[in-house]
Amino acid sequence: MTTTYRVRFWEITHRKQKGRPYGVRWVTEGREHSEWFVTKALANNRRSQLMQSARAGEAFDVASGLPASEMRRKNAATLVELAQDYVAMKWPDQAANSRRSTVESLATACASFVVDGPGRPDVVLLRRVLTVHLLSPEDRRDALGDDEREAVAWLAKASRSVGDLTETSAARELLDGLTKNLDGSTAAATVISRKRAVVHNLLGYAVERGMLAVNPVSHLSWKRPKRVEQVDPRVVINPGQARELFTMLTYVGRRNSDRGAHLVGFFAGIYYSAARPAEIVNLRDTDCKLPDEGWGELTLWESRPAAGSRWTDSGEVHDRRGLKHRAAKDSRIVPVPPVLVALLRAHIERFGLAADGRLFRSPGGGVVGSATYARVWHAARALAFMPAQVASPLAARPYDLRHAAVSMWLNAGVPAAEVAERAGHSVEVLNKVYAKCIDGQRDAMNERISVMLGV
């Protein structure tokens, strides 16, 4: 687009012709342009708009004669079209879970940013066709049923233009649409923040493409929901509770299988090394130093997060990634105490290894699924805890074992830098998120304070 600031306007022109007799005429770099209207008032209004753009220092497109802002709106794609291009651009370099998060966030935005009209499908159907078909790359798209094809056709007509987002009310409407779950309830603050970040990046891409002059989300006064970034101390177990859980795991599935006993080392590995579940699930015998006596070491080097076959390059459920916050082939060596060394040695002796040397495997030899180990964990909690504790957040998720490990190390006086290195975090994140007391230590802390107070 060739632009100029040399714009000259003529007075309103009247011609003896039915329909649109009043014309606005102007010249850009010697090229004449005109627009015609039914009434003189409409013509004057349009001339005033154009002149205001010129006075504001806005460039005009030489070929069409329109202000640059109008050209951007005119050439802007619909939000669905922009989202499709954005996903295609980001896909090759994204991790599987990031792909899924991006598509799901954009599906929420595109399903709400539409022109309301007859035959509008419900939001569940709109989000589904956006996720499984419209926003996914062509080779990842699901076949559609009749209702879904109708929803796709409706979206093609109803998706609003990216250019509409120059209006503050439209940008606010877009963000407000991110706050709702499918059932109409308000989404969690972390979910809203994640989706807003994706939409912000999408509109930054629109600026890069010349569809918008500025990112409307950056300049919008919109109250973001508050995120809880610290670990809830109620989820953190103490060492005694951890040992009880590991014992109760051996009773899960005892009559029909060893599924609980097979995962004792898995859960203990998370607790005693502060590893992420996706790191431990990939642990191989060659990654372990398990001496007969004393401390051992685990070398963590690859993560296998569950993402879904739609989102991985391999078509497998579990993605293959490097360690979080590290270079692709970087590793992290974590010293582990004798209790974990003994548990892992016993596990290998009893259950053997997968074909590729993994300690933990599904019955078919594959990667242990997150749904599988979550079910085993919930069963063990029900056996190990009192009813009130089972109903509480205490160790509600396997990931909470990592929180407990980091909290235990910090409370034991291990320097923050060393804890951060072992856990694979920065010191800043560590102090911000993980520095919590262990369940059951409050009485001990109160006793120390009492001694200092002399009471």
Image: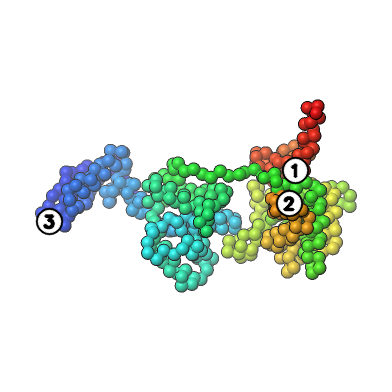
Q: Going 75% across and 43% down the picture, which residue do you hit?
A: 438
Q: Going 37% across and 61% down the picture, which residue do you hit?
A: 117
Marks 2, 1: nearer the viewer = 2
For the residue pair 143 and 67, the one nearer the viewer reads as: 143
**Disc 3 on helix, strand or loop?**
loop
Q: Which residue is mark 3?
A: 17
Where residue 438 is drawn, which disc sits there?
A: 1
User: Tag 1: residue type?
Assistant: Ile
Assess disc 3: are there few (<14), some (14-19) or many (≥20) residues with their C-alpha within 10 Å of its C-alpha: few
Please identify the residue farthest to the right as the structure is shown.
293
| Cα–Cα span, label 2 and label 3 | 84 Å
| Cα–Cα span, label 1 and label 3 | 85 Å
**Disc 1 on helix, strand or loop?**
loop
| Cα–Cα span, label 2 and label 1 | 15 Å
Which of pointers 1 and 3 lies earlier in the amino acid sequence?
Answer: 3
Q: Which residue is mark 2?
A: 389
Q: Going 76% across and 50% down the picture, which residue do you hit?
A: 271
